[in-house]
Image: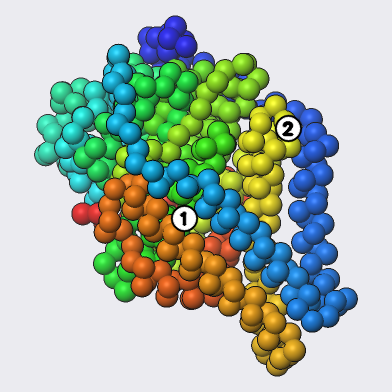
Amino acid sequence: MANLSQGLSLATPAQAEADLAARLTAQSPRRTPPPTPWASTAIHGAVLVLWIALLGAPFGLHGVWVWSAGLVYVAYDTLLLVFTFWQTLPLLKTTPPSAAVSRRVSVAVIVAAKDEALVLPVTLKALLGQSDPPDRILIADDGSADATPEVLARLYGLEPPPLGEMSTRHPQIHWLRLGGGGKARAMNTALSLIAEEVVLTVDADTLLQPGAIAAVRDAFSAEADLVATTGVLTPVCAATTSGRIMEWFQTYEYIRNFLARYAWMRLDSLLLISGAFAGFRRAAALEVGGFDPDCLVEDYELIHRLKRYSVRHGRRWTTRVLGGALARTEAPSTTLAFLRQRRRWFGGFLQTQYWYRDMVGDRRYGALGLAMLPVKAVDTLQPLYGLTAFVLLCSYVVRGRLTILEPVGGVIAAKILIDFSFQLWAIHLYRCWVGDRRIASFGHALVASIIEPFSFQLLRHLGAAWGWVVFLRGRQTWGSQQRAGALR
């Protein structure tokens, strides 16, 4: 991989882009679709058939079973909680100090930015203030039309370089100006212009805690087969009423999600690497073709490609979530912004699930193919299961069907109790993991467990349903995310 890395570094940006495109074409199942194996067809087909059957349950069943969509939804979600609980038990143990490494890898940070003058200064300040600073910070400016040039000139003495070139007047911060080809292309160009062994992608609205880069550098230095990591993110919203409510819900959601990532990591099946703060071994990313410009969630898709390449070429590449690599990231502060974000996330998830459908049920991938990806097959329709269950419940309430509402209410009450119990466990475990006792509140967790199923959870499902619509329409562009400046 070293020779490949050096070769691309010496190429011109145009040559590097052509080389990456050729590798992407060779390695991406989107470019060269493989046959869909029977196991994948059976798993995805079973999920769809079951949902269709549940739609007819109210017309052929009696008692609580007329709410079969809800029962299946509750059972599935509870099984995932049990799985996460079991797999995260090791976090209760004190983590021993990391062993000394013989050689420290070099680290560069790529900050992909477009019209981010509002948040860029505080993000760069956090990067410069690391206990173990990166060897290079590269701002991949993808055609900014705001005050970004003025900010970089005033704070760091950088002058705008010609398009496609870098300004290197600052000892640590370099400025790459591009013409606006999209985030994935900007990051690919940046990858081809640097020589550091590990590359961190950090969104312009993400603040790394002081020890974050040290944790990433240590992990890559200690494990030669590690090709991708994700830090642990905490959402921050605007200081408005809606912002505080959205931050409250998203905080508990992020806690559960990152614990779930740890659980899947233990089975060597971690796929979800947050591009807001992710680390990649540069040579491996280049070897498989870099980021895919046509994917709506380029970070998530790249992990699939790395895993696929690893198995097909006999590598032992792994991915990790690092509890010591902490960051805060700006999250949607309004309902509409949240729906748009989840529309993009879920639409990109569906894209990736479809492109990599040949991995589902394939035993060559171990737990990834036999457990993680089948779960993701269920997740493609889980939001529709949830919305179906809610619509049916509302219809029973409106029609006053007490014989159904009483047992259904018992199921819902039991699920709320399970969710609350897991929420308490998750908060305690998360605090042990990241070493911060101030995160979240047990009292607030109770309130969230009661109202979330009828509010925030529905928003998530609506955003996902919107993602289904645009995925089926083949939409490829999503617009820009409006910043509230919550991290200033």
Q: Is residue 458 above or below residue 80?
A: below
- How many angstroms separate mark 2 from mark 1 (CA)? 28 Å
Q: Which residue is mark 1?
A: 256
Q: Is residue 420 left or right of residue 9?
A: right
Badge 2 or badge 1: first in the primary sequence: 1
Say which element carries label 1.
helix
Three-letter code for the amino acid on which mark 1 is drawn: Arg
Three-letter code for the amino acid on which mark 2 is drawn: Asp
Residue at 64% over, 47% down: 376
Residue at 48% over, 66% down: 421
Q: Is residue 229 left or right of residue 207?
A: right
Front one among 24 and 473:
24
Q: Is residue 473 visible?
A: no
Q: Position of residue 474 (x, y in %)?
A: 65, 47
Front one among 317 and 149:
317
Q: Is residue 432 visible?
A: yes
Q: Which residue appears farthest toward the front when viewing the image?
A: 93
Labelled disc at residue 206:
none
Q: Is residue 448 above or below residue 308?
A: below
- When asked about the image quadrant of residue 384, the answer is bottom right
- When asked about the image quadrant of residue 50, the answer is bottom right
Proximity of marks 2 and 1: CB atoms separated by less than 8 Å: no
Q: Which residue is mark 2?
A: 362
Residue at 57% over, 18% down: 315
Q: Is residue 125 above or below residue 57?
A: above
The C terminus sits in image quarter: bottom left
Q: Position of residue 118 (x, y in %)?
A: 24, 51
Say which element carries label 2.
loop
Q: Position of residue 190 (x, y in %)?
A: 37, 25
